[in-house]
Image (spheres, rainbow, N blue to C red):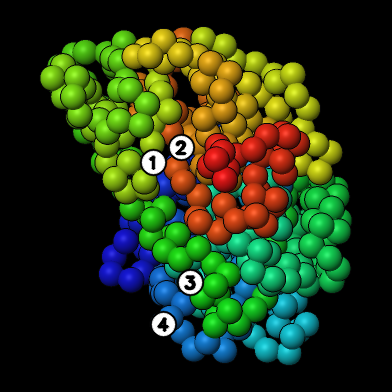
Amino acid sequence: MTGRSITVEDVPALLAGAEFFSTSAAGEGIEFAGFWLEDILARTGPVELVTADELDPDTPCAAVGAMGSTVAMAELPPSGEEPLALARSLGGRFGAPLGAIMPLNAASVNALHPVAAAAVLGLPLIDCDGMGRVFPLIHQTTYELAGLSLSPLAVVSAGNDSLLLDTGSARAEQIARSIAQAAGGWLLCGMYRTRVGLLREAAIHGSMSRTLEVGRLLREHASDGATAQALAGDPPWPEVASWPPHARPGDGESSRRGTAPHEHLLRDLMAATGATVLGGGRVVELGPSTRQAGTVYPGNPTSMVVHDHDSGRLIRLEAHNELVLALADGALTAAVPDLLCLLDRGTLRMTGPERLTVGDQVDALCVPAAPVWHSVHGLGLGGPGAFGFPLRHPRQEGR
């Protein structure tokens, strides 16, 4: 980030950070969005990144995010004009133009769409979001928890169809997904139209800055690791053991045996995000889950097992598209709404079930969700039960 703006030069870091916070669900097709955003910023110039406190509390703002398939979006990419249609729809409905843009979520492709929207509209981008990660539904947000209305929901399709849905959150989502399926596989959405002053309690602040910071770490370490391996003539570090669960890299035995590139990166990621390492080692099982996703959730249920080298435990990860649960030898150790993600030790890049094969070496991390997600209402909207798992979140034990 250059000063308080997002420039063309920041896009690679933004893309890398967006992959980290995607809960290993970024999948194929997200890379196109980086080139697309670079082209927009090259034409419009930088986007001003501001805190909510820097704007007049009465400034009208709205969240921008995409719904649907990133693969479909890569095959039928946005023209870049979609934000203009969203702004017209919401401006016409409320009788006042937008004065700022906020992200739906600063993760996966939706970390890039609000930047593009702010650039095209010439508006500041508020440094916040409503998820702190990826959730499958657009009403699984802290905006919703704070009582902000998702609707009217403005949507624009790949074919430039423009609609405004004025109904309840769940109903608006259901209708919009049907439209997306019939209109090219994705929609750009404008929602949660509100005043900036209400974001003080409704948003997760600093999300875009955090995504950029983590992205820079990932890119720096990937570059350093590739250079070191090339100079040494060594392959990646497939057999290096991880450290005991929840220990910091470099502590105890880890520091005495030397530190591999992935351990350096994990140490920095833990410092930047508060993450803990659930374990790491070889993927020994990967395939479709025996559980089926609920009808309301778009997803591809998948299950994978990682053999933790240090403890010998088997860590099972359950996913829909996003990683949802982690179990160590059958005991629940981490779950939504906390963010679960996987680091590929060989590439020093975030990965997921779609990119992995049996035998790959990964580390599983858990990043704590914003505190509001661990409230009673937060767990109801984004906890294990919301995904069809009748389980108490590990943090609830002993309450």
Residue 367 appearing in the image: yes
Q: Are marks 1 and 2 in contact (CB under 8 Å)?
A: yes
**Foreground tag (1 vs 3):** 1
- Mark 1 touching mark 4, by CB under 8 A? no
Question: For mark 4, does the 10 Å Cα neighbourhood hold few (<14), some (14 to 19), or many (20 or more) residues?
Answer: few
Give whichever of discs 2 and 4 has the lower sequence position: 4
Q: Is residue 92 above or below residue 268?
A: below
Q: Nearer the viewer, residue 378 or 394?
A: 394
Crowding around mark 2 (Cα neighbors within 10 Å: few <14, some 14 to 19, many 20+) is many
Query: Which mark identifies residue 366?
Result: 2
The amino acid pointed to by label 2 is Cys
- Residue 75's image quarter? top right
Residue 15, how many percent across, how many down?
44, 47
Mark 1 crowd level (few <14, some 14–19, many ≥20, 10 Å Cα): many
252 up-or-down from 25: above or below: above
Q: Which residue is mark 1?
A: 275
Q: What residue does disc 4 label?
A: 54
Mark toward the start of the polypeptide (1 vs 2): 1
For label 3, the residue is 126
Q: Horizontal and vertical percent for residue 305?
A: 54, 16
Q: Residue at x 44, y 60 (%)?
A: 208
Q: Residue at x 73, y 67 (%)?
A: 150
Q: The C terminus is located in which quarter?
A: top right
| Residue at mark 2 to residue at mark 4: CA–CA distance | 32 Å
Disc 4 residue type (three-letter): Glu
Q: Secondary structure at mark 1?
A: loop
Mark closer to the chain start, 3 or 4:
4
Above or below: residue 236 compared with residue 269? above
Residue 65 visible in rendering: no
Separation (CA) of disc 1 from disc 4: 30 Å
Which comes sooner in the sequence, label 1 or label 3? 3
